[in-house]
Image (spheres, rainbow, N blue to C red):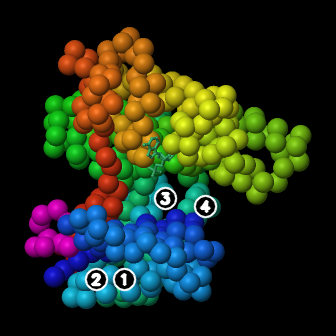
């Protein structure tokens, strides 16, 4: 039976999925979903079957997953044990940056890989790890069709005013642009909305992807018009450990007055800020909701304030609003955050139904609310698996 492998390599983690492709026409069926985290230090593998039953939830010997290639080999061992007859014909990779050109998944050839490596300076914390996963998979499956799925691709049709900064033009030409990220998640939500509420899909929709990374996307007719993330995955909303929007003057101040190096500022903005920096406690929303401290409450208040502010800005960019969709770990699970984001939003025609919200239903707005509010669990893995299936269908 023909299968596709999906890989999503982070700085010290590797998410993997095994999908059965059937006749290549229907939706890929997930068979195994797993993740190895803390690669290079204390690796741990967790994997489940499609019915949720646990296949593995155990530490790995450190030397077995010292790098991404080692982690991939462990994932493949598990897959071979569980599904010995799976024919792996395609591998789909999440790649954070596709640069200005890639508006769709791309077949990974040595030339494309070399081209993607030139984008590493644009996403130094993600792109090198993504490409390490690609190289490991190319070595392990030289005969499989390999495809890169870009977080930036969904946003590539932005109007120019949403794609540029007001810097001298030469910087735009060098690639200093608002790329936008979380594109695989937005692509999934757009497709799901088309299935469950086509009248909303064709309208003006804001999707709030609220997880450890967080951003919002304004869409018309299922296509991205604007995103809160810009040149890097630092912009826009505050996140677990990332600052979100910041006056660039702050960076100048940190360099000039505090004497901080580029590495120190990067560490501050990517790893020590956001919910963690504000609360002084945790980057984890569940812990902040449970914590009884003023700093935790203020961290939540700032997170909510920025979401509401961006909601107004995106609604203006869209020329109005028909639906708001919550997704991501916080968006899908936090009754409190959804409540706080929607509180007092009657001015825009949005009214949350608190009982529906507490029950976590798909539709959480009242019947009278002109703006529909939905909770849709996102699924980036299936977007990668579909791209692998489609590429295999074209070239395999
Ligand atoms: P993600 O990066 O999409 O996996 O989302 C991770 C975030 O979702 C973390 O901040 C979690 O604390 C948060 N999260 C998951 N479940 C809940 C919940 N029931 N209530 C509040 N936050 C949650």
Task: Tell which circle, 3 or 1, labels the residue nearer the N-terminal end.
Answer: 1
Q: How dense is the environment of label 4, judged by Cα within 10 Å: few (below 14), some, or many (20 and up)?
A: some
Task: Tell which circle, 3 or 4, labels the residue nearer the N-terminal end.
Answer: 3
Magenta segment range? 20-28
Q: CA distance from mark 4 to mark 2?
A: 33 Å
Task: Tell which circle, 1 or 4, labels the residue nearer the N-terminal end.
Answer: 1
Q: Picture quarter containing residue 237?
A: top right
Q: Where does label 4 land, which residue?
A: 125
Q: CA distance from mark 1 to mark 4?
A: 28 Å
Q: Where does label 2 land, which residue?
A: 82
The quadrant of the picture occupied by the N terminus is bottom left
Q: Where does label 1 land, which residue?
A: 78
Q: Which numbered tag is attached to residue 97?
A: 3
Which residue appears at 20% of the width and 73% of the height? 20
Do the residues under discs 4 and 2 have CB atoms within 8 angstroms? no
Q: Picture quarter containing residue 316?
A: top left
Q: Position of residue 200 (x, y in %)?
A: 21, 31
Do the residues under discs 1 and 2 have CB atoms within 8 angstroms? yes
Which residue appears at 72% of the width and 49% of the height? 268
The answer to whether residue 313 shows anywhere in this view is no
Q: CA distance from mark 3 to mark 1?
A: 29 Å
Which residue appears at 42% of the width and 46% of the height? 329
């Amino acid at each position: 039976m023909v299968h596709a492998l999906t890989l999503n390599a982070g700085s010290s983690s590797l998410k993997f999925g095994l999908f059965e492709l059937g006749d290549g026409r229907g939706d890929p069926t997930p068979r195994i979903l797993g993740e190895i985290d803390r690669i290079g230090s204390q690796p741990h593998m967790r994997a489940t079957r499609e019915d949720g039953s646990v296949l593995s939830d155990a530490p790995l010997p450190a030397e077995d997953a010292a790098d991404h290639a080692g982690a991939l080999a462990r994932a493949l061992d598990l897959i071979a044990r569980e599904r010995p007859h799976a024919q792996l014909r395609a591998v789909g990779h999440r790649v954070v940056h596709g640069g200005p050109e890639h508006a769709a998944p791309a077949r990974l050839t040595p030339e494309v890989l070399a081209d993607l490596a030139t984008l590493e300076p644009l996403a130094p914390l993600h792109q090198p790890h993504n490409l390490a996963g690609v190289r490991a998979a190319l070595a392990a499956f030289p005969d499989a069709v390999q495809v890169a799925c870009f977080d930036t691709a969904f946003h590539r049709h932005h109007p120019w005013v949403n794609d540029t900064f007001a810097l001298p033009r030469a910087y735009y030409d060098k690639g200093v642009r608002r790329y936008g990220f979380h594109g695989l998640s937005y692509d999934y939500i757009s497709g799901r909305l088309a299935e469950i509420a086509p009248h909303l899909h064709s309208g003006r929709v804001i999707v709030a992807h609220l997880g450890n990374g967080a951003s919002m996307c304004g869409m018309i007719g299922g296509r991205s018009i604007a995103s809160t993330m810009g040149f890097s995955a630092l912009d826009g909303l505050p996140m677990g450990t990332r600052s979100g929007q910041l006056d660039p003057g702050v960076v100048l101040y940190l360099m000039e007055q505090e004497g901080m190096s580029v590495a120190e500022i990067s560490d501050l903005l990517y790893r020590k800020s956001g919910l963690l920096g504000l609360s002084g406690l945790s980057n984890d929303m569940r812990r902040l909701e449970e914590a009884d401290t003023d700093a935790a409450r203020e961290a939540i208040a700032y997170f909510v304030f920025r979401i509401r502010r961006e909601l107004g800005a995106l609604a203006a960019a869209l020329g109005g609003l028909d639906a708001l969709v919550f997704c991501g770990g916080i968006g899908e699970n936090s009754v409190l955050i959804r409540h706080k984001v929607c509180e007092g939003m009657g001015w825009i025609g949005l009214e949350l139904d608190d009982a529906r919200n507490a029950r976590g239903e798909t539709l959480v707005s009242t019947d009278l609310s002109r703006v529909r509010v939905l909770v849709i669990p996102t699924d980036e893995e299936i977007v990668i698996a579909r791209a692998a299936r489609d590429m295999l269908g074209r070239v395999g």
